[in-house]
Amino acid sequence: MSFKQGLSQSLRQNLGLVLTPQLRQRIEMLQMTKLELNDLVNQQLQENPVLEELSPEEISVAPSLGGTDFAEDSPASALNGLNDYEANTLSYQNGATDAGDFSASDTRDFAGESNFDNYTSERPATTETSTSVNETGESEVGERDSFEEIDFGQTFEEYLDPGYRTRETEVKEGPSFEQFLSSEQTLSEYLEWQLRMTQTTEEIRAAAEAIIGNLNDDGYLESTREEIAQLGGWSMETVNAAFEIISQLDPPGVGATNLQDCLAMQLCAMGCADRLAVKLVQQHFHKLQNHKLPELARELGITIEDLVNELKLIKQLEPHPGRKFAPRDAQYVEPEVYIEKMDDDYVIRFNDDGLPQLRINSQYRRMMENKETSKETRDYIKDRFRSAVDLLKNIEHRKQTIYRVCEQIVYRQRDFLDRGVEYIKPMMLKDISEDIGMHLSTVSRVVNGKYAHTPQGVIELRRFFTEGMTNEDGEEVSTQIIKLKIKKMIEAEDAKNPLTDDEIAKILAQEGQKLSRRTVAKYRDQLRIPGSRERKQVI
């Protein structure tokens, strides 16, 4: 039996979900911070010649989002297609919106923008399928370039000449010279500077430099003395002499291999080498950590008062002597929006300072209208034009989505904005998701990593969302408020007789909030508060 193999062609139609580049960019921009968005816009300005940045003289106040209808049947909807968007009368320049026009009490229809991150397309973003009838009456299916449907006149009027007027004169206070920071000195640089001021032999100095090079950020030595000696071929006498020099440098305690040695070195540097505190940290450190003071006092044959005095001295020491020299990674936080109270209402305005304000270059319109322009040039302009329009649409959609989320946050957390953290209400991401008709993942992208300047300070939008528990009156109370109550109880407790977790739970139950001892302990640990035994002061 023989089989014949061959190639065959078949036409099959199936339905698939394809995420277009425009929607992919829209989703990515939603989760960007303002600084990341600024980098993206600057990158697009460099890569796309169709885009250009407005000069300061041309910047003006554009129509606000507050007066625009984004309903699904509105031509302004950003999801109704490219043609509808170009027909939108809202002229947008990134960063040119007057943020003072957003009022949290206004009601606007954003139905057309719901659940945007679940939108997909079954066709490429650059072509459309069209059906025509030929001379024989048969149907022909062809591809029509969606770029041909763009109304150049209307689009360029919106993005090119929106009727700019000069922004009102505004005096902005620049940064002071104190805010310009120089590079900070590291621990190794500080120790090496002191070492150069010390008179010693070149061999000992080289060994001391090797010791400094093996210190971690906390000032502890990560190698043994034997390893240091093998590293440079030095004798143990040389290494020990180098250690003796390092132990005399500032900050005291550097070069130690463990916490006990670090504390003992600091006590010796303070002139307390003969104090009982040195023996406590070297020989009885475990009992000190477990706060077994009565047992330790009996073992040493001293009174509790004498032991507490030595313990007070130990508590003054620095367990991480190199900590103040450790590099600190600066996290730059810039508010995305300002939530300000005006009269009896809250106003939401965007912080667009520093963001480039964009428009489409008029030169490329003239090149498109010029019949002498080559086909290759036209195709290039078309591609760049699509990219520019998509960017402007997605920036606008990002602002609309952030505004809608902030509007609902202000509506639900009005008491918190008015009166402080004790009045924050339980709120989940799904609550906002249901209110504005967006997917839960969309709301999560909006609130993550973005900050708002509020009457209660600069707060990450995610911090507005807390879990809740029901009290005896049937009211939901935020867990944040419960943690705050626990913290205040501990701060007001008697230091000689601190509250246990059971006692805290009973007090909360008397106030109408029943919690188990385990839940109280969990909240206390989250607040980084030690247990009652560690908090207890004997005297």
Image: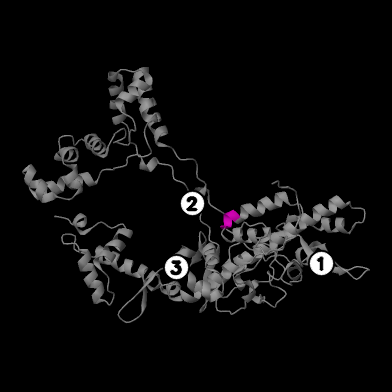
Q: Which residue is mark 3?
A: 465
Report x, y in % for residue 98. 64, 68
Q: Kindly identify which residue carries mark 1.
A: 130
Q: Nearer the viewer, mark 1 or mark 2?
A: 1
Amino acid under disc 1: Ser
Q: Splitting the image into 4 quarters, where does residue 272 fall?
A: top left
The residue under label 2 is which amino acid type?
Gln
The residue depicted at 45 percent of the width and 68 percent of the height is 464
Note whether 414 is above or below 357 in the view shown: below
What percent of the width, then of the height, locates residue 210?
Answer: 38, 26
- How many angstroms separate mark 1 from mark 3 (CA)? 48 Å
Q: Which mark is residue 331?
A: 2
Give coordinates of residue 269: x percent, y percent. 24, 34
Q: Earlier in the sequence, mark 3 or mark 2?
A: 2
Magenta part of the chain: 32-36
- Marks 1/2: CA–CA distance: 52 Å
